Amino acid sequence: MNYTKYVRTVIAVAVMALINAAVPITFADDNTAANQTNSREAGDFGPPRGAPIEEVLVAPPGVPQPIHRSYPARVIVRLETKEVVKEIADGVRYNFWTFNGSTPGPMIRVREGDTVEMHLKNDPSSHMAHNIDMHAVMGPGGGAAVSVTPPGHESVFEFKAMRAGLYIYHCATAPVPMHIANGMYGMILVEPPQGLPKVEQEYYVVQGDFYTEGNYHAPGLQAFDMKKMLLEQPTYVLFNGREGSLVGANALTSRVGDRVRLFVGDGGPNLVSSFHIIGQIFDSVNVEGGTLINHNVQTTLIPAGGATTIELKTLVPGTYLLVDHSITRAFMQGALGQLVVQGAANPSLYKKISSGPFNNASTIAALPPHEMPAENDAMADGKRVFGQICAACHQADAMGLPGAFPPLAMSDFLNADPKRAIGFVLHGLSGKITVNSTGYESQMPSFGSQLSDEEIAHVLTYVLNNFNNKGGTILPAEVKAARANTAVK
Ligand code: HEC
Ligand SMILES: [Cu+2]
């Protein structure tokens, strides 16, 4: 490809688009209800009241406190652009360009009608000038035109937050796609005057696509790859700028019965996200971050440079995977997070039913007792349990997923003490472990209430005698004893 020619064409097209956009557009009917709800002007809100408020920023996936204010205020927001080398995946480093050192930059939360005083500093150690385009701003460049800031300097501008919604902010310094691809984006929530309904948990997740010279998981410091970006063929597709940023010890958490609100954005620069949580249905989705609310949504589309507020109620305990349902990205490029729901089982909503004939599905009590497979069926049963449960995380080939799930294949950790694994399956496992000289610090849920003694014995025996492990047998009686042991503790 002739790169220079390509770039010239891109610039020419962009300039044409700008010229076209400058032509005034008239609406045939300005009196529709939709137009009226969006017709607020600065004077409608009145001047800011009270002392100026310093915005308290927290690291992602944290979210600033909800606003309990019935009047518009002046809110001072301080962001600092920083270029930092950090891990993008285990053993893989990348030179991120950031707001406040993180990708995404911190979430900002204001109220409709607030006057936002935006301070943008550029760290003296930066190599580039940076600026900020906030989609919540009504003004040229969304603020970019007045915030170009060389290293060691500060720019200040203010804007009135005119429209409630969830908005992306990003750096818009040329070459814009490169600043975004290096991690320069975040979100600002403009709450409606009446605030948002109370929920138990709020989280902040932003997807982005990353282009590195080396392949997925090629170790060491990886340079930005302009060619891959032009082809829109990312090496990594990530939530919150790092593979595993929402996995294991970093997983999002909630309890059974909690209402969870997710502020989800897509920084791009290129890919559109098909955001989905495996095993959940979104109760409500603020489509495109605006005021239109959709209900009972399985997967919601988030445009690059767009956002969505999602609410769901977590009813059944367990681990749920956040994915981009363009699913290759989830399982082979890193777009995978976890929502771990803790609490008592909810068998009326979700329950495993063992194989076997049954006539009356309406009452669990009417089911015949679980039929135990004969001794020579143990391996087949173990294979079934492995495929139905363990493979979800440890993968069908038992090779695991780097940065998230350790391998069970040729696992020195497992083979060193196979009986210890009974406890992992019964009670789960968390904390730092080393498997085949790679460290994992993640969380395996417990399966003690879901699997019988026989099933646990069979699946461990199956794993020990397959995937190049060293062999061995775990007996149902040993599982039973392990259960009894911890019961007295
Ligand atoms: C929801 C994901 C998940 C599922 C399902 C799961 N595990 Fe794990 N497992 C993990 C994680 C994460 C770790 C590492 C925990 C840590 O870092 O402390 C782990 C660790 C292990 C280990 C020790 C480390 C190793 O690689 O040898 C064994 C053994 C194991 N799991 C067996 C199983 C078996 C058998 C099943 C099926 C019954 C299973 N796991 C199901 C997530 C899972
Ligand atoms: Cu920048």
Image (cartoon, rainbow, N blue to C red):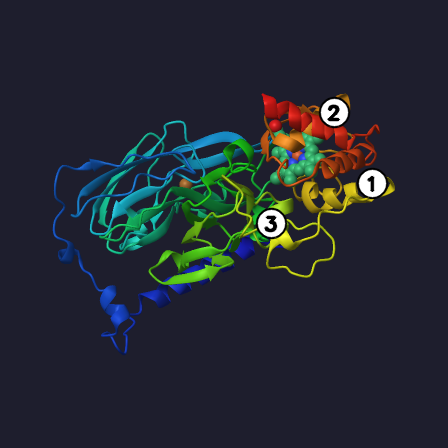
Residue ID for mark 3: 351
Q: Nearer the viewer, mark 1 or mark 3?
A: 3
Kindly identify the residue that appears in the image at 35 percent across and 48 percent down: 133
Q: Which residue is mark 2?
A: 419
- Residues under labels 1 and 2: Cα distance? 17 Å
1 or 2: tag closer to the N-terminus: 1
Image location of residue 24, percent across then percent down? 28, 70
Q: Nearer the viewer, residue 358 or 133?
A: 358
Amino acid under disc 2? Lys
Q: Residue furthest bottom?
A: 28
**Residue at 13% across, 37% down:** 51
- Residue 357 occupies which quadrant of the picture? bottom right
Q: CA distance from mark 1 to mark 3?
A: 24 Å
Q: Mark 2 or 3, which is nearer the eye?
A: 3
Look at mark 1 in the image and give the residue it sits on.
379
Element type at mark 1: helix
The location of residue 134, given as percent across then percent down, is 33, 49
**The quarter of the picture showing ligand 1:** top right
Q: Earlier in the sequence, mark 1 or mark 3?
A: 3
Would residue 463 be found to the left or right of residue 253 on screen? Answer: right
Disc on the earlier residue, 2 or 3: 3
